[in-house]
Amino acid sequence: MKKIDYGNYKKPSDFMSFEQGDTQIRIISNGLLGYQHGMNTARGFVNLGICPEDETCEHCKKGYEPKLIWKWIVFDHTDSRVKLLDAGPMIGNQIAEKLGGKHGDPKEYDIVINRKGLKLETEYLCAKAKGDKEIPEKDQESFEFKKKRLINKYFKKRAN
Ligand SMILES: [Zn+2]
């Protein structure tokens, strides 16, 4: 349980999202690259699950193209929560290629993601943070438990 901070309240989500301007995060898992199915509907994007990339995929059989997706589990310094970062090519490539290629494993340093614009005009710029924010020991101790919870909830659906 966590005390509700009324001045800084945002509906909690398992998924990382970015406000306008800078958001500082720390990646706390390995990165995964894969394919995911989804659909744009009137009520927004619906996630149809990870593509197994073989002939058992019901969505591929119907002719739906999966999209490339980059996944990390991150610690959001803004609200001190552990979340899933489902990234498209814009953020995914920057973290993997620009940051990972230049600075090494992004688990070792904070990343600042700058969001500019809305909807289709949205641009994200990812950079190594000038300084790492401290992660309280209490939060670090719960990382493994929270990571497992997210993995069981979002990655193991097809296996059940
Ligand atoms: Zn598929």
Image: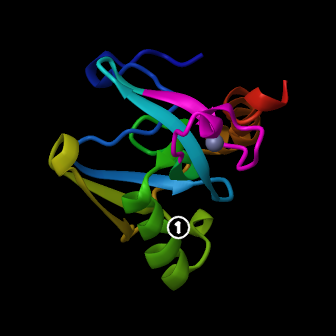
Q: Mark 1 belongs to which amino acid?
A: Tyr
Ligand 1: image quarter: top right
Residue 2, by quadrant, is top right
Task: List the single residue furthest toward the right.
Answer: 160
Q: Secondary structure at mark 1?
A: loop
Please report the residue visible at 15 percent of the width from the left and 48 percent of the height from the top: 117
Q: Judge whether 47 appears above or below 122 on screen.
A: above
Residue 123, by quadrant, is bottom left
- Magenta stretch contains residue 59: yes
On the image, the x and y values in percent for residue 23 come to 33, 50
Q: Is residue 14 left or right of residue 44?
A: right
Task: List the single residue furthest toward the front.
Answer: 62
Q: Which quarter shows the N terminus?
A: top right
Q: Is residue 11 left or right of residue 137?
A: left
- Magenta stretch contains residue 1: no
Q: Is residue 146 left or right of residue 69?
A: right
| Crowd rating for badge 1 (residues with CA inside 10 Å; few <14, some 14–19, many 20+) | some
Q: Judge whether 104 appears above or below 79 on screen.
A: below
Q: Nearer the viewer, residue 135 or 122?
A: 122
On the image, the x and y values in percent for residue 45 come to 39, 29
Q: Which quarter shows the C terminus?
A: top right
Q: Nearer the viewer, residue 9 or 63?
A: 63
Q: Which residue is mark 1?
A: 109
Write the start and end of the magenta stretch as one range. 46-66
- Residue 132 visible: no
